[in-house]
Image (cartoon, rainbow, N blue to C red):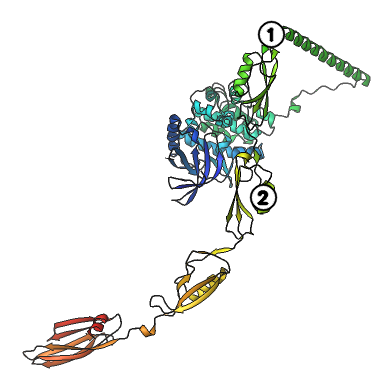
Amino acid sequence: MINKRLNERYKLLEVIGEGGMAIVYRAEDLILDRTVAVKVLRSEFSNDDEFILRFRREAESATSLSHPNIVNIYDVGEEEQVYYIVMEYVKGKTLKEYIREAAPLAIEEALSIFTKILSAIRHAHDNHIIHRDIKPHNILITDSGQVKVTDFGIAMAMTSATITHTKSVLGSVHYLSPEQAKGSISTEKSDIYSLGVVLYEMVTGIVPFSGESPVTVALKHLQEDYTSPRLLNDQIPQSVEHIINKAMAKEPKQRYDNVAQLQSDISIALEPTVEHQNLHQHFDDEETKVLAPVTPIKEQLPKQAPEEEKPKKDKKKKKRRRFFIIIALIILSLGVITAVTIASLFNAKDVTVPDVTGLTYEEAVKELQDRNLVPVKEEEHSNEVEEDRIIRQSPSPDSMVKERSEVTIVVSVGKEKKVIENYVGMSKNNVERLISNLDFEDVEWIEVKSDEPAGTILEQTPEEGEEVVIEETTLILKYSNGIQTVTIDNLIGMTKKAAESYLKDKGLKVDISEQYSDKVDKNHVISQAPEPFVEVKKGSTVKLVISKGEDPSTKEQPLTFEVSQPIEIHEDSEIIIRYQDATTKNGVAVQERASNTKTYTFPLTIAPHGTASFQIYINGKEHKNKTYTYREVQNME
């Protein structure tokens, strides 16, 4: 998909994130000339009509949100069954990545980040949009420290079928509310529970519930209590633990009614004089509790009254007696366990070990448990067996064993992935040597123009740090050809001095010739070779043709011509002939009184590209006028 253009507008440049449902690309909006993030739905969901419908509806509803702590949605579209969402590009890291780097976060910092998250979620709830998938992976922190919540509405698009089909639930199940785990409808209080889990993780560094499978974690959300945050981090104030407990109450009715209440408690949580006062009720039917300040565990232990020091011999006797009692209890326990085990083995029935190779881990566990056998899981990379399926087992299929015997099943974790090294900046020869023992599917070398020394690696795909299956990966390496080049600007119309200075600064030589031109001013560039915007090697020669101005030999001269005008006169009249030409703007050629018809002759001078004209007046009234052009006079001659 790299370099693909969606609807001839969004050019996909690089992958910046991947999830179970979608891949996120950094892209260029070719119309608005800006960087955007484009989330593209994975192809396996392109035929799930229900998913696509919800994906579109929820993404479009999310475009109505406008908040400084919410990633803006710009566009939603489709092209040839590729469904995508265009959103604001946020440069930074996810809150999950930040927690891994800095956990547990300082309480003040954690609450500062949390306050911005709450502001975003409250805005969404006010617009009747429930997030449904709040987790640190969906919270971005920019390089300047700004907090942005993303992926509004995407979670609702997940049907039970798609959850089974993808691993996206693995990341979400740790933040799932009990009602979501049961498959019930999500509400604003479901988001509040997830917010409580996020705050728990920020201040402790771990999630409240973990397990080997999503089902295990989901059951813990429903049935088990989590470790008190203050036992994991004694810097957590009681007030903050109180807020987490209320947000994460298993029964929705015991949680905060809305995000506004949660915001209110967070805002006063660190006030020294009211650490526990004024917080919203922990349960709806209880009064607000004011708790005593917490003291370290050691200080909470009752102080023993001073006693007289007993003889050291008595102390040694007591220790010895305690030691023997403990040893005796251990031996007795081992004996009982051994006896029970032996008895159970003698009484256990024989069972045939089923063949579970090739089954999924879940299928294999069920098959073994149905035979009253105990599955023991081991994991191993495999190039032949797909991920989550059984590679081999011990005892082997059809073996006879006693019930409750252990059966080791080796589960494939897929093909082994390796982390790509950084080759950028290294020489082509060194990289060839380094990758010679790696079984890349293909290595593609691309030579590009660059000022860097010849053979220097400029770009690589996959990038440094990516985990890939080497045997299925094409390594693309772009390297410098070592030729220094420069692109010449358009110099036509520049002055000779300016053009020479420009070429010198670019490390280019100049060859100047001159010619006459009636279109380009003197000492300005008429033409250049190579033409504008052509790339050339440094040190190359650029030819310039400079204007010498108009050619004197072809320059047109003013023309003087005679004008004869007969005037018919029958009585005594005043005759005036006025003219305008290259010599005067208001000249008088004739001024006299006449009583007979007469022909008047007078000269006019006309300039190149100019005009000349005259007007005849009889007794003050205009009798005739005429205008001549330069070309007209030339033709007359």
The image position of residue 160, as x and y in percent, is 50, 25
Mark 1 or mark 2, which has the lower sequence index? 1
Q: Is mark 2 on a helix, strand or loop?
A: helix
Name which residue lies at 55% across and 43% down: 15
Q: Separation of disc 1 and disc 2 at Cα?
A: 62 Å
Q: What element carries label 1?
A: loop
State left or right for residue 447 relative to residue 577.
right
Q: How crowded is mark 1: few (under 14 residues within 10 Å), some or many (20 or more)?
A: few
The image position of residue 145, as x and y in percent, is 58, 45
Answer whether residue 127 is visible to the viewer in this image.
no
Q: Residues within 10 Å of mark 2 (few under 14, many from 20)?
A: few
Name which residue lies at 55% across and 22% down: 251
Q: Nearer the viewer, residue 206 or 195?
A: 206
The image position of residue 247, as x and y in percent, is 57, 28
Q: Mark 1 points at which residue?
A: 349
Q: Nearer the viewer, residue 607 or 390?
A: 390
204 lies above or below 483: above
Q: What residue type is labelled 2?
A: Glu
Tell me the number on the disc at residue 176: none
Q: Quadrant of the C terminus?
A: bottom left
Answer whether residue 140 is visible to the viewer in this image.
yes
Q: Mark 2 points at which residue?
A: 432
The image position of residue 149, as x and y in percent, is 53, 39
Q: Nearer the viewer, residue 206 or 370?
A: 370
Q: Which amino acid does label 1 sit on?
A: Lys
Tell me if label 1 and label 2 are in contact, CB under 8 Å: no
Mark 1 or 2: the one toward you: 2
Name which residue lies at 50% across and 26% down: 161
627 lies above or below 179: below
Q: Residue furthest left?
A: 570
15 lies above or below 122: below
Q: Quadrant of residue 367?
A: top right
